Amino acid sequence: MDHFDYQQGEIYVEGVPVTAIAEQVGTPFYCYSTETLVRHYNVFSDVFRGHDFLLCYALKANSNQAIIKSLANLGSGADVVSEGELRRALKAGIAAEKIVYSGVAKTQEEMAFALEKGILQFNIESEPELHQLSRVADGMGKVAAIAFRINPDVDARTHAKISTGKSENKFGIPWTSARAIYAKAAALPGIRVQGVDLHIGSQLTDLAPFEEAFGRIVTLIEELRADGHEISVLDLGGGLGIPYDQAAEKPPLPLEYGEMVKRIVGHLGCKIIIEPGRLLVGNAGILVSKVIFLKYGEKRKFLIIDAAMNDLIRPSMYEAYHEIVAVKDTGGPLSAYDVVGPVCETGDTFAVRRDLPGLETGDLVAIRSAGAYGAVMSSTYNTRRLIPEILVKGTEYAIVRPRPSYDDIIGLDKMPKWLD
Ligand SMILES: *Cc1c(COP(=O)(O)O)cnc(C)c1O
């Protein structure tokens, strides 16, 4: 469920008509619903009420300051994968003690910055990374609290580009060699072992891979404790999927996921961390775009809109499905369109043979479920300006990232003196 519904034949975001925003800010733009975000957060915090629990929002899904702040106000922590994201989390008011630092390879500078701020945990993914953190922390007279990201060798059964928990993926420590690396870590200066971490992939639409992976981790934690390690934090990662295609996909509800987590790992007495990204923001956002032209090819009818792959890359990168709807539903007969952007690549296609009501130049469409991995993955390819982000709360809305000017973009380039 979300808060993008038709009222009197046109889409409202909570109490605001999309057309009113489009008139003020122009198209294309991203638009987010606070109410949807809050509801998603609360489902998780309700399931884990009474447990030692921390939700660490995975910033990489959508790192707009206003989104982070909306979640921070509810008590959210953060999962970050770079110094930039760490800075964003801190700036939006998330306390360092609620921040975990994930990612395949952190640089010395990034480690030093995070140590200086005093974050909750580093999730370490390799032995060289462990040794580097030990050196950096020891050199600063600090102790880094760590977990190892364990690769449980479980097939997440999701798109290959976002599957991370198989032994052939670059992520984590193979679960078969976990005990050896924990033993090494325990002997290193500047390191305090406190937890176990995993993240097996994104957009999982089935609980079974989670269950299998979490089961392996339970066994591992029992072994690590028997080896004398104090394991008090269990970070289960993110990855729960959302229904991009409402008619075809029925991913597990956050409630079902939470109940499963409690059943499998609840008895360990660990602080439970989860790192959802997509689930919180995915369905809390839409991309609004305007029809530039209709073009009749020999075999296809193309709806060319003013948003493109540089604004939302998921369809071209992951063959992702996004629902596309007319902002004003005329109720007329449907016909099949290929919905494409103006960028010079065939991959710049949002949908093929999609049924939509009759549309004309100037009409608005909304690409749904665009709140996660949308704005954050956008670029200025084709010297197209980054598109604005709008946050709605009730009957109010605000521009939370303005559209840059062309001078802003071109001005980033500098002439060398021999050309000036
Ligand atoms: C990407 C990522 C997440 C969030 O994944 P979602 O599928 O958006 O929930 C969480 N943890 C780690 C380590 C990640 O890389």
Image (spheres, rainbow, N blue to C red):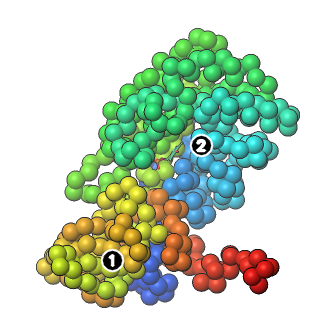
Q: Quadrant of the N terminus?
A: bottom left
Could you tell me residue 418's position as x and y percent? 78, 80
> Which residue position is annotated with label 2?
103
| Foreground pick, 258 / 100 | 100
**Which residue appears farthest toward the front when viewing the image?**
418
Q: Quadrant of the C terminus?
A: bottom right
Disc 1 Cβ-to-ligand 1 distance below 8 Å: no
Could you tell me residue 232's position as x and y percent? 61, 26
Amino acid at circle 2: Gly
* Relative height, residue 159 to residue 390 (above, below): above
Q: How many marks?
A: 2
Question: Which SS class for mark 2?
Answer: loop
Task: Name the mark on residue 26.
Answer: none
Task: Name the mark on residue 365.
Answer: 1
Residue occupying the point 26% across, 78% down = 302
Could you tell me residue 386's position as x and y percent? 54, 74
Amino acid at circle 1: Val
Residue occupying the point 40% across, 30% down = 154
The span from disc 2 to disc 1 (Cα, nearest Å) is 36 Å
Quadrant in which residue 234 is drawn: top right
Q: Earlier in the sequence, mark 2 or mark 1?
A: 2
Disc 2 Cβ-to-ligand 1 distance below 8 Å: yes
Could you tell me residue 221's position as x and y percent? 54, 20
| Foreground pick, 169 / 46 | 169
Res. 12 in view:
no
Asked if residue 377 lies left or right of residue 279, the reply is right
Residue occupying the point 54% across, 14% down = 223
| Foreground pick, 188 / 132 | 132
* Relative height, residue 123 to residue 361 (above, below): above
